[in-house]
């Protein structure tokens, strides 16, 4: 259930776009998958985010501290927000809530999933951010007894299915059908300039 | 000592390893017979070492200068280009630097840009048999392929300014076109008249490397191609990673840009 839920983050997601960018030029499926997989281990919405979420949840449970969003942020925010939480294209991730409800209906005792859900009101209040699908996936992996590095890899494997689907679709297209903009005014150079 | 002993116990069960390029030989790090800590570090610049590794001999000053120019003419990081875009997307998703680099290198293995057009062009030029005749050869290519490797540029019509500049710089190095380069130009004349196509940079470099003094084989050409692309790829990633990690101007798609034409819901 969880692997299906993260199977395809959609054609707007960076990892799928990386794979699609490779495939539109005719890169073989293996190379295009490599391009996408290189991206899918990301800290923002990839395997590393899953890994950090699992570590964060395990440490909260172990240390049994009262929930303090500011401490959580100080310790776990490495530039991409609190792992497991955020917004998707500026909105709440509705898939995350759906997966959470399905999981809790399926199995009553999921302490990490419940912990993640219990963090949401605090984080939503402080940062206006909510559970993400990768966060729920991570929590479930922790509940199933996987290590955080395994959770990282499992996320990448699961999401490679959507990657493969989207990249293969590009093989029937001309390169110009994949959105590209090369208009002059939209690319601005602001770096080093040779002295006149 | 115990670790070394364990490693040496294992090595009795394996075949020997052979290398034509170097390694740590009797405790000395070596590349092409040279001690990397001594001769290589003291006397060589990277392009000279690269050519030493590919040609199996010390390159001339002309050869070094030519490859240097080939690399520099292509050194423009632009994340709108697919290979660099892949790396930029990866770094903006928080992937480690090396993974973002690996992702962009994977995207270099493409049919319409990167490694494949260069290798295919060299192969095409080498396959030409003068007995067939140039026009029939070109006509056959056009009937067999939708893209003729080495010609045309997807994004910018007209002559490739890098090719024009490369030829100027090569002439300053007293370079004279070899058989492949001459053939490349002859084919261009026909394609220009019929289809308005010009030699692209991949084609020019392919012909240059196929001819003397380089006479490179396929694998060696891949190495030069990777040398050509790796700096713009790296700098694209650095640019996004350092300056625009979250707000990378990566042409975000809108929902309205996506048209689903698959199976409808059951």
Image: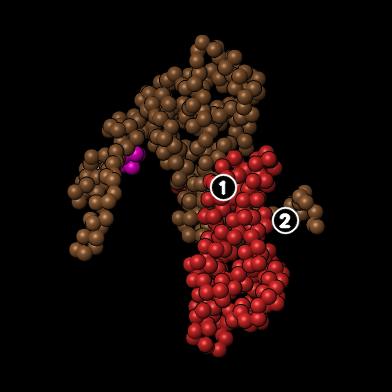
Chain colours: A red, B brown
Checking the image for residue A32, the label placed there is 1
- Magenta stretch contains residue A49: no
Residue B69 quadrant: top left
Residue B60 quadrant: top left
Q: Residue at x 77, y 49 (%)?
A: B261
Q: Position of residue A13 (x, y in %)?
A: 64, 58
User: Is A154 positioned to the left or the right of A13 in the image?
Assistant: left
- Please determine whether, in this image, residue B195 is positioned above or below residue A74: above
Q: Position of residue B158 (x, y in %)?
A: 61, 29
Q: Position of residue A157 (x, y in %)?
A: 56, 59
Q: Residues within 10 Å of mark 1 (few under 14, many from 20)?
A: many
Q: Position of residue A164 (x, y in %)?
A: 62, 51
Magenta stretch, main secondary structure, is helix
Q: Callout 1: residue from which chain?
A: A
Q: Residues within 10 Å of mark 2 (few under 14, many from 20)?
A: few
Report, in whole angstroms, how far the alpha carbon at label 1 lies from the one at label 2: 23 Å
Q: Residue at x 52, y 62 (%)?
A: A153
Magenta highlight range: B44-50
User: Is B265 positioned to the left or the right of B155 in the image?
Assistant: right
- Please determine whether, in this image, residue A90 is positioned above or below residue B145: below
Frontmost residue, B225 versus A54 = A54
SS label for mark 2:
loop
Q: Quadrant of the C terminus of chain B?
A: bottom right
Checking the image for residue B254, the label placed there is 2
Q: Callout 2: residue from which chain?
A: B
């Amino acid at each position: 259930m969880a692997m299906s839920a993260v199977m395809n983050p959609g054609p707007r997601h960076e990892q799928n776009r990386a794979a699609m960018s490779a495939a539109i030029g005719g890169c073989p499926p293996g190379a295009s998958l490599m391009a996408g997989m290189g991206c899918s281990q990301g800290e923002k919405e990839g395997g590393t985010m899953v890994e950090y979420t699992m570590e964060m949840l395990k440490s909260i449970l172990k240390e049994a501290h009262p929930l303090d969003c500011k401490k959580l942020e100080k310790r776990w925010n490495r530039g991409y927000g609190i792992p497991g939480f955020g917004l998707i294209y500026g909105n709440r991730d509705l898939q995350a809530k759906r997966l959470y409800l399905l999981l809790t209906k399926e199995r009553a005792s999921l302490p990490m999933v419940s912990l993640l859900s219990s963090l949401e009101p605090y984080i939503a209040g402080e940062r206006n951010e909510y559970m993400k699908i990768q966060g729920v996936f991570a929590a479930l992996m922790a509940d199933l007894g996987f290590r955080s590095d395994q959770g990282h890899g499992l996320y990448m494997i699961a999401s490679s299915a959507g990657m493969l689907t989207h990249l293969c679709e590009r093989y029937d297209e001309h390169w110009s059908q994949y959105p590209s903009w090369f208009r002059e005014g939209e690319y601005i150079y602001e770096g080093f300039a040779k002295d006149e | 000592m115990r670790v070394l002993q364990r490693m040496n116990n294992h090595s009795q069960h394996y075949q020997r390893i052979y290398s034509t390029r170097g390694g740590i030989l009797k405790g000395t790090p070596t590349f092409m017979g040279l001690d990397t800590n001594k001769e290589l570090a003291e006397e060589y610049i990277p392009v000279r070492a690269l050519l030493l590794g590919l040609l199996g001999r010390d390159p001339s000053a002309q050869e070094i200068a030519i490859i240097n120019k080939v690399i520099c003419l292509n050194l423009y990081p632009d994340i709108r280009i697919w290979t660099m875009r892949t790396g930029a997307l990866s770094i903006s998703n928080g992937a480690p630097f090396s993974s973002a680099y690996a992702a962009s290198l994977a995207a270099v293995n493409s049919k319409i840009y990167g490694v494949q057009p260069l290798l295919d062009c060299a192969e095409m030029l080498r396959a030409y048999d003068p007995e067939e005749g140039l026009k029939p050869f070109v006509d056959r290519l056009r009937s067999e392929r939708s893209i003729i490797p080495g010609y045309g540029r997807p994004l910018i019509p007209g002559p490739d300014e890098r090719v024009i500049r490369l030829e100027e710089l090569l002439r300053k190095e007293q370079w004279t076109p070899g058989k492949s380069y001459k053939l490349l130009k002859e084919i261009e004349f026909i394609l220009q008249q019929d289809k308005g196509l010009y030699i692209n940079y991949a084609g020019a470099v392919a012909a240059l490397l196929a001819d003397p003094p380089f006479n490179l084989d396929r694998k060696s050409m891949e190495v030069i191609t990777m040398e050509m692309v790796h700096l713009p790829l790296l700098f694209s990633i650095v640019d996004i990673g350092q300056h625009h990690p979250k707000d990378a101007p990566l042409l975000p798609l809108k929902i309205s840009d996506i048209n689903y034409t698959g199976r409808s819901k059951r």
